[in-house]
Amino acid sequence: MLKKVLSFTVLIVFGFFLNTLQAQKVKETKVSFNKSDVAAYSIEYNVSKSDLSKVAEQYFPKVINGKKTSSSGFVQYKAASWDIMPFEKGDIYYKIEGNKKTSTLVILVSMGYDNFVSTSSEPKVYASLSMFAPEFQKEIDAYQLNAKIVAQEKKINSLEKEYKSKMKKERKYSKKIEKLNKKIEKNKKKYESIATEIDKQKQVLDDLQKQKK
């Protein structure tokens, strides 16, 4: 039974590892850019389009040195340098596609004048992106971990506010109870005094009735 459990666990871990590797594989493809089909590279990640977009927005300005603009649905860096690329200056484009579960980073690399490179024309670019893909996964992991930490902190802050609110209400209720207890005690003294007076008056009545006989 233990061997079966261990084997099943190994299969799950291996499957997850294999899935991660597959998701990070760089694929050469063609995309439409300025009404033309051009060479491009795509990398799929097991993360939402929204999260991947946010990671890319934070990451690329730190590693790509160039003017950031937009073109044909892509974020564009003109005459830019990127340490992982096998050239000093080039044009780098990216966009994010996908849904809530998986997303794809599409990258275009041009040596200028929309001269987009492919594996056949510049194999070193593919090699560079193949090294970049798992490193970018680390950025995604760090972003998601930080997002979970922020979400957990917000949850705790919300609970702490609710706790303080409930404690405040308890103090308010306790003061009301204290005031009511004082009123009850005061009222008790009054009706006990009345009860004593009733007994006294009954005794007077009893004495009077005895005189009648």
Image (cartoon, helix red, strand yellow):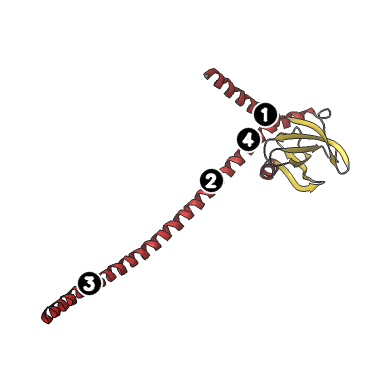
Residue 48 located left or right of residue 191: right
Q: Nearer the viewer, residue 159 or 3?
A: 3
Q: State the residue at coordinates (31%, 65%).
A: 181
Q: Position of residue 201 (x, y in %)?
A: 18, 77
Q: CA distance from mark 2 to mark 4?
A: 21 Å
Label 3: which residue? 195
Label 4: which residue? 138
Under tag 2, what secondary structure? Answer: helix
Q: CA distance from mark 3 to mark 4?
A: 83 Å
Of tags 3 and 4, the one toward the viewer is: 3
The three-letter amino acid code for the residue at tag 2 is: Gln
Label 2: which residue? 152
Q: State the residue at coordinates (63%, 28%).
A: 16
Q: Is residue 92 above or below residue 120?
A: below
Label 1: which residue? 19
Of tags 1 and 4, the one toward the viewer is: 1
Q: Earlier in the sequence, mark 2 or mark 4?
A: 4
| Residue farthest toward the bottom in the current orientation of the protein | 212
Q: CA distance from mark 3 to mark 1?
A: 86 Å
Label 2–label 1 contact, CB within 8 A: no
Of tags 3 and 1, the one toward the viewer is: 3
The three-letter amino acid code for the residue at tag 1 is: Asn
Neighbour tally class for label 4: few under 14, some 14-19, many 20 plus, Cα within 10 Å: few
Q: State the residue at coordinates (36%, 61%).
A: 174
Under tag 4, what secondary structure? Answer: helix
**Which quadrant holds residue 89?**
top right
Q: Position of residue 81 (x, y in %)?
A: 74, 39
Q: CA distance from mark 1 to mark 4?
A: 15 Å
